């Protein structure tokens, strides 16, 4: 019931301004009726006042009722679509799960690369042949696991994209993909010793330290 009320309130706020006025008049009329036991006691006012006010209130109440029916109809349609989509979403989840499992199984340098891409908010990795004379191990592993797809290759630079399912999962659960190390530059552009990097990542993981990568690799 609370969720329905919140949805209805949000709909009213986003709806045309007139509904706010008609709803206020309708509620005010009901409040007066509840307090005074009668609807619009015009007292000593002219005879035309009471029927006029009553007509205005009736029109407002009708407008509110119509908008309520429209809102419930819209909500019912959305609910029906959501229920109808459940089997499809379940099948999609089963299809996507292997990619997510391989993503969660990453560790070491390859996970650092994914984390840094998320940190930069850029689903784009590139490797320059002038910097890397052969494909780094982390790149080979990520491509083998299907987590990186070749996007384009030009002028000695290969551009990669993180798998859409993996990227979406990373964006949703950012707290699971935080760099162990601080990189002084885009890490995939740095020609570094992966064995040393793996060791430093393990040290950071164990010790909870987070010093810049260039300091860790030069000491």
Image: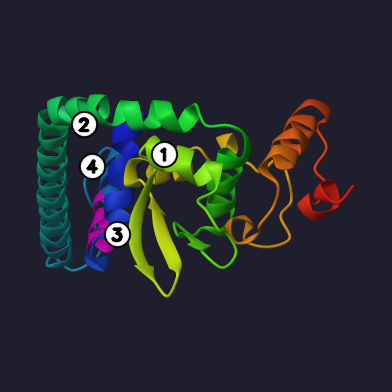
The quarter holding residue 124 reads: bottom left
Q: What residue did someone put label 2 on? A: 92
Report the Cα–Cα distance between label 2 and label 4. 59 Å
Whether residues under marks 4 and 3 lie with C-beta atoms below 8 angstroms apart, the answer is no
Q: Report crowding for label 4: few under 14, some 14 to 19, many 20 or more residues within 10 A (C-alpha).
A: few
The quarter holding residue 76 reads: top left
Report the Cα–Cα distance between label 1 and label 3. 31 Å
Image location of residue 186, percent across then percent down: 62, 61
How many numbered marks, from 0 up? 4
Determine whether 65 is above or below 91 in the image. Answer: below
Dot label at residue 84: none
Image location of residue 168, percent across then percent down: 39, 44
Report the Cα–Cα distance between label 2 and label 3. 33 Å
Dot label at residue 14: 3
Q: Is mark 3 on a helix, strand or loop?
A: helix
Start-end of magenta stretch: 19-26
Q: Would residue 100 be counted in the magenta stretch?
A: no
Q: What residue did someone put label 1 on? A: 169
At x 13%, y 47%, the residue is 65
Earlier in the chain: of badge 4 and badge 3, it is 3
Whether residues under marks 2 and 3 lie with C-beta atoms below 8 angstroms apart, the answer is no
Report the Cα–Cα distance between label 4 and label 3. 33 Å
Whether residues under marks 2 and 4 lie with C-beta atoms below 8 angstroms apart, the answer is no
Q: Report crowding for label 1: few under 14, some 14 to 19, many 20 or more residues within 10 A (C-alpha).
A: some
Q: What residue did someone put label 4 on? A: 38
């Amino acid at each position: 019931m609370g969720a329905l009320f919140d949805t209805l309130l949000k709909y009213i706020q986003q709806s045309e301004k007139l509904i706010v006025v008609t709803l206020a008049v309708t509620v005010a009329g009901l409040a007066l009726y509840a307090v005074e036991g009668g609807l619009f006691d015009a007292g000593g006012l002219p005879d035309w006042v009471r029927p006029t006010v009553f007509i205005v209130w009736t029109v407002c109440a009708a407008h509110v009722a119509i908008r309520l029916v429209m809102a419930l109809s819209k909500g019912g349609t959305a609910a029906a679509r959501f229920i109808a989509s459940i089997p499809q979403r379940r099948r999609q989840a089963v299809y996507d799960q292997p990619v997510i499992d391989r993503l969660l199984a990453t560790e070491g340098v390859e996970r650092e690369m994914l984390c840094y891409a998320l940190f930069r908010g850029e689903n784009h990795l590139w490797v320059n042949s002038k910097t890397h004379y052969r494909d780094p191990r982390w790149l080979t592993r990520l491509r083998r696991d299907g987590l990186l797809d070749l996007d384009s290759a030009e002028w000695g630079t290969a551009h990669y994209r993180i798998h859409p399912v993996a990227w979406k999962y990373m964006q949703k659960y950012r707290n699971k993909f935080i760099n162990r190390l601080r990189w002084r530059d885009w890490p995939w552009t740095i020609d570094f010793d992966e064995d040393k990097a793996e060791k430093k990542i393990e040290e950071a993981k164990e010790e909870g330290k987070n010093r810049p990568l260039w300091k860790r690799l030069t000491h």
